[in-house]
Image (cartoon, coloured by chain):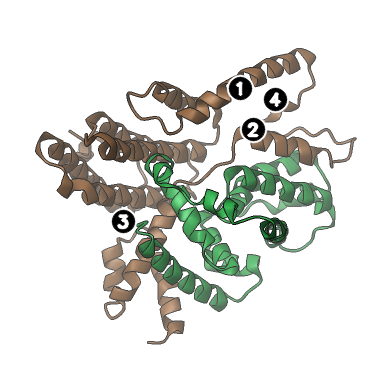
Chain colours: A green, B brown
Amino acid sequence: MELREFSEDIIEKARSLDSKAVSAVFEHYYPKIYRYCYYRCESREQAEDLASEVFVKVVKSIKHQSGNFEAWLYTIAKNTLTDYYRRKSVRKENSVDEEILEAMPDEKAVDNAPLIQEELKVAINKLTDEQQQVITLKFIEGYDTAKIAEIMKKSVGAIKALQFRALISLKGILKEGQIS
Amino acid sequence: MNNKNMEDILDLCFEELKKGTPLKEVLAKYPDHAEELKPLLLVASRLESAPKPEPSTNAVYNALMEAGKYLPEQKVYRPHFQFDWLFRPQFAFAKAIAIILIFALVGWTTVNASASALPGDFLYPVKLATEQITLVLTFKPEGKAELRLTFSEQRMQELLARYRKDGIIDAKLIREMLDEAKLALNRISDLSKEKQPQFYSKVIHFNDYQKNTLQSIQPHVSGEQRRYIDNAIETCSNRGEWMRNMMKQGMYCPWQESSGCDWR
């Protein structure tokens, strides 16, 4: 959970392409964006590629950015993921759902791999897009409800409703798969 | 009560849990809805206590290089954090990096193969060495603390895998699992004041999760091995109680000898 807001001064300097400030933004947000992508794509490698793609876009356009930086950053991440899903669905038309099957942990992998992260990832992947966002921002990154509302450009009430429904879905998914 | 109210109550419960209030106390505030709230809060707790995935150093380096291309040329791209040295242009240093990369490439396959190794496996020492290197290369205090929790989680998964494979409860793994969790909490004083309550709460939930997992295999274990599990569960219970007491008093301190929370 991020209790301290990332300094607005640093973001302002990053907007003027100050290299130190840009790298500070990078250091602070790269792991967050990586995790945001990790729980919503199929592999660590893809999450790393997507996070990198997001930061190239950030560096390219940060000088024109104004307003809430985090909301802007997560919008870029969301759009990058949408493009990724689109590309993936085009590929899927030509092949069986092999990628999805590969992403599901097999019995051996469940025995040996970092169980929690992989299982939660599979479960989170089954939620709707907005539910995935709320779960990742709330429980993985630790943002409070008001901050998530800002980032997702929704009302606090809408975020509460989304997290309620997401947890009910997750409860069912985890129970169904005997993951818990 | 309609969904709208439940959504509000659930959110209030999260706030309470975040402050370190035990689940039982939180549920006691909403007795009419405790049955519905409990499974949702447990799912949330599981999500929060799961070790966070971290990007590889290599990925961060590559991303920095890629993003750096789009900064104006007159701006020298020199990150101030731990990757700073990667951007210095000294030729000798570049050669050193090249050599390291060659070794890294050779070692990569071994390290990957070692990820699922168990104690006694040929590659298990490689796995432990990789963990130690990751720890040394992590500079942020919160990163080091998170890593300790990740290692504790790893030891628990190895414990379960070993049990499933050979039916053996490895006492050494239990000790290491508990020691790593202890080392995570001992990092608390390195964290900023703002981050201490949140990390403390995380360790509490992580400790609960380990206790629940041990309890799930407890009935299937007998004899001397059962004693190991019983002791570990007792240790987790003592730790949970001690940490919650500390948190109630607003004291985010590391383990103390007098806490009596060590595994015997």
Alpha carbons under labels 4 and 2: distance apart? 14 Å
Q: Name the residue under label 3.
A: B248
User: Which structural element holds mark 4?
Assistant: helix
Q: Which residue in the structure is indicated by mark 4?
A: B85
Contact flag, marks 2 and 1 (Cβ < 8 Å): yes
Q: Mark 1 points at which residue?
A: B104
Residue B219 badge: none
Of residues B163 and A131, the one drawn nearer to the viewer in this rendering: B163
Mark 1–mark 3 Cα distance, whole angstroms, equals 47 Å
Q: Check the picture and name the quadrant holding the C terminus of chain B.
A: top left
Please tell me which of labels 4 and 3 falls first in the chain. Answer: 4
Determine the residue located farthest toward the top in the rendered image.
B92
Identify the residue at image location x=40%, y=50%. Answer: B202
**Residue A168 x/y as whole percent:** 42, 71
Which is closer to the viewer, label 4 or label 3?
4
Q: Which residue is label 2 attached to?
A: B58
Q: Which of marks 1 and 3 is in front?
A: 1
Q: How many marks?
A: 4
